[in-house]
Image: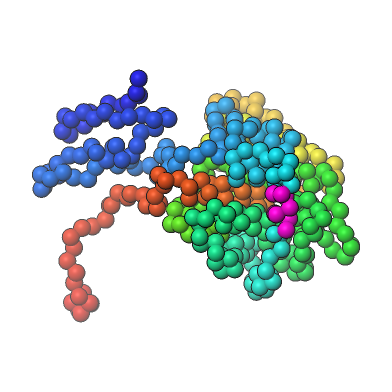
Amino acid sequence: MTESLTVRDNRTGVEYDIPITDGTIRAADLGKIKAADPATQEDGPGLAVYDPGFVNTASCRSSVTYIDGDKGVLEYRGYPIEQLAEKSSFLEVSYLLVHGELPTKEQYDAWVHEITYHTFVHENIKEFMEGFRYDAHPMGMLMASVGAMSTFYPDAANISDPENRRLQIIRLIAKMPTLGAWAFRHAQGKPYVYPDNDLSYTGNFLSMLFKMSESKYAPDERIEKALDTLFILHADHEQNASANAVRSVGSTQVDPYSSVSAGVGALFGPLHGGANEAVLRMLRRIGKVENIPAFIAGVKDGNERLMGFGHRVYKNYDPRAKIIKQQALNVFEVTGTNPLLEIAMELEKIALEDEYFVSRKLYPNVDFYSGLIYEALEFPPEMFTVLFAIGRTPGWLSQWLELVQDKEQKIARPKQIYTGERGLDFVPRDVRWA
């Protein structure tokens, strides 16, 4: 039996039978519901949906990431995030996201080889980055550099060629750590470090970040694993603001560098990529464990904000938060414990037991512990979103790839509800100003 929704338009008395597919109705079907304009007695525009922020509007069909926010489930291509974080690597997860299936050994080896081969960037890009002011924000540098790469690879505009698309995807995943590390070194006034292709993807990134005078940088395995895990956890998250930006810009059929640059720009915004920094500011303001009860009372009274808890999608414990918490403990074995950790863990314990927060489904999210790891690794707060962007790149590219191959997709062009004046008569300047 075909599922459908029967709608009665009380303006006209006409009933419409609208098919339901995958729990959705098509906006175009609502557009068939029309009523006569009282002034002209002609059919007015069809019914549209007003949905600021697209909180209940599906813009695409996707097989990349599945989220069940009520149950705290996150899956990439059907695989639970917990299994991928424990048993996989970031490059294997990247292959999974881009290709839709796990690689064979031969496929994986070839994938790693190609990405490793493409980690170097053109020397002109290095000169381009060196031209930024000493205090340029790393995310601004990353956004500009990614966009600039489209001028170095003009063939990337040929998005209809599968082999060409594949090459650009490899280039972007390979070069993002190089650009991110150089933005970090630029802010510190240190010379840029070239990729070391003897190291792993994440190990090479750490080398480009922190290598000094030693002839060979050897990353600590626990730190390398923690950062690799964070990349996995950030790799994709359905139709978030930056993925939507990548898809929206990509719908114009522009090259992937321009689309991903738009994703970096969206992630730059504090409401998307800056939440973990807000958590650190909150923990510092609390200061010590003894101050937590007063802080909790302030939250309940509306005088304080509990950062790192709650999520627009998750109404349960964010599955990524549990994994990051364990990785934070592993990192602190190397770096020493961040004094804010004790405050964070006690705050989490109280919030999870307090009916005020439980009833509101305010559980820790991915940002609650990630900032503690980044700070322990001596990243300045402005680098946090750069790390996020590196991890999110394969997800953005998977969303972009899905978009350009989807025959149902059209150029993004949402409707609006016009609220301004109409039919005004223009008065020339000499009359208006007389």
Q: In this view, does 294 lie to the left or right of 335?
A: left
Foreground pick, 83 / 152: 152
Q: In this view, does 180 lie to the left or right of 242?
A: right
Q: Can you say whether 61 is above or below 264 in the image?
A: above
Q: Residue 326, image x and y in percent?
A: 76, 36
Q: Is residue 113 magenta?
A: yes
**What residue is drawn where x is 86% and y is 53%?**
218
The residue stretch that appears in magenta: 110-117
Instruction: Give the image location of residue 101, x and y in percent.
Output: 62, 38
80 versus 113 height, above or below: above
Viewer-proximal residue among 284 and 259: 259
Task: Give the percent coordinates (x, y) of residue 20.
Answer: 36, 29
Query: Which quadrant holds residue 135?
Result: bottom right
- Which residue does the image show at 20% across and 79% down from the upper left? 430
The quadrant in which residue 145 appears is bottom right
Question: Farthest residue in the top direction?
Answer: 1
